[in-house]
Image: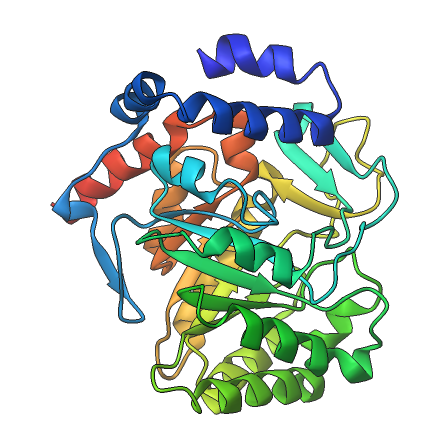
Amino acid sequence: MYKWFLRPLLFKFNPEGVHQFTTSLLKLILSIPIVSYLFKSQYRLESSQLNKNVINILFKNPVGLAAGFDKNAEYYKDMHDLGFGFIEIGTVTPKAQEGNPKKRLFRLKEDNALINRMGFNNKGVESVILHLKTKGDIIIGGNIGKNKTTPNENAVDDYDICFKALFDYVDYFVVNVSSPNTPDLRALQDKKPLLIILNHLQKLNHSKPSPKPIFLKIAPDLNDNQLLDIIDIVEETKIAGLIATNTTISRAGLKSENKEETGGLSGRPLKNRSTEVIRFLKKNAKNPFPIIGVGGIHSAEDAMEKFEAGADLVQLYTGFVYEGPQLVKDIKKAYMEIVS
């Protein structure tokens, strides 16, 4: 029903407005007990075969919602009801910020893709915490970044603030230095500034009685030498692992009229490159570490490619927008077949 009726209707309107409308409507609908039951019976699939222990966290299933969908931790319970095994909220910054000027989200229908230049629009870390106080046993990842007005030489201070504030409310952290939509942010992927941020967070982390796993989210546009540097950084800082990958600035092979819009490209055109990055990381890591695979997953087969390449968990965003909640269930069915 989603692909053949709801999606064509929703795709007639502005994508950012549609996102806000549909998530708010879903939240309202799922607050009705009988409707919530029907949604869960249709889309949720639970089995011990889907359980996966990664970084000492038991995930009920390996299919997560990527950061960017629920920036302010307002809809994670509803997404959990649709069958996701974990939800990554954010990117969260210390202070609230509007993000980049609108229009800043574009559909590329012919390419099954999106281009966004949102710019870390969010209500700030203190607002996010208010929503997370009742999260229960839902596994939440906290994706953290810096405010646009914070210069790169002071970036570690913003990550420090978010880490300390969110520590008691999330199950793992993600350091986002790979979004193309905050000026000069990707410069923090260079080895020296990245080591400063990660070593600082690890020092804070290990001062806690029970440290939390820290992941680094990387861009698909890194070359092999840069990826080797990233592997060295993981081993040196002893962070938990990597999320591969964020959106790309490449526009190779696109057909849609919006293809020249600036921002990060996500969706099907990213599928092969993100899988290549996962495979490279898995092959070249001297000491294996967990990888969360994201980018271009529009079918169960796409997800299985990520697992085969070396991903321990996968995340959806653009594929979920194009394919609907049935995609989550289809991936879980396929995963059960490969582990049975």
> In the displayed structure, does residue 30 sit left or right of residue 185?
left
- The residue sitting at 38% across, 21% down in the picture is 32
Q: Nearer the viewer, residue 106 or 145?
A: 145
Q: Quadrant of the N terminus?
A: top left
Relative side of 204 to 209, left or right: right
Quadrant that contains the C terminus: top left
Instruction: Let me know if residue 245 appears in the view.
Output: no
Colour treatment of the image: rainbow
Which image quarter: residue 104?
A: top right
Left or right? Give the position of 258 relative to 227.
Answer: right
Q: Look at 59% across and 89% down and name the residue there.
A: 200
* Residue at the image point whose x is 31% and y is 26% from the top: 43
Picture coordinates of residue 164, whole percent (x, y)? 55, 77
Figure label count: 0
Q: Residue at x 59, y 82 (%)?
A: 229
Residue 136 image offset from top left, x and y in percent: 33, 53
Q: Is residue 25 visible?
A: yes
Residue 159 in the image: state x and y as whole percent.
65, 75
The quarter holding residue 110 reads: top right
- Residue 9 picture quarter: top right
| Percent x, y of residue 171 | 39, 65
Reply above or below: 27 against 238: above
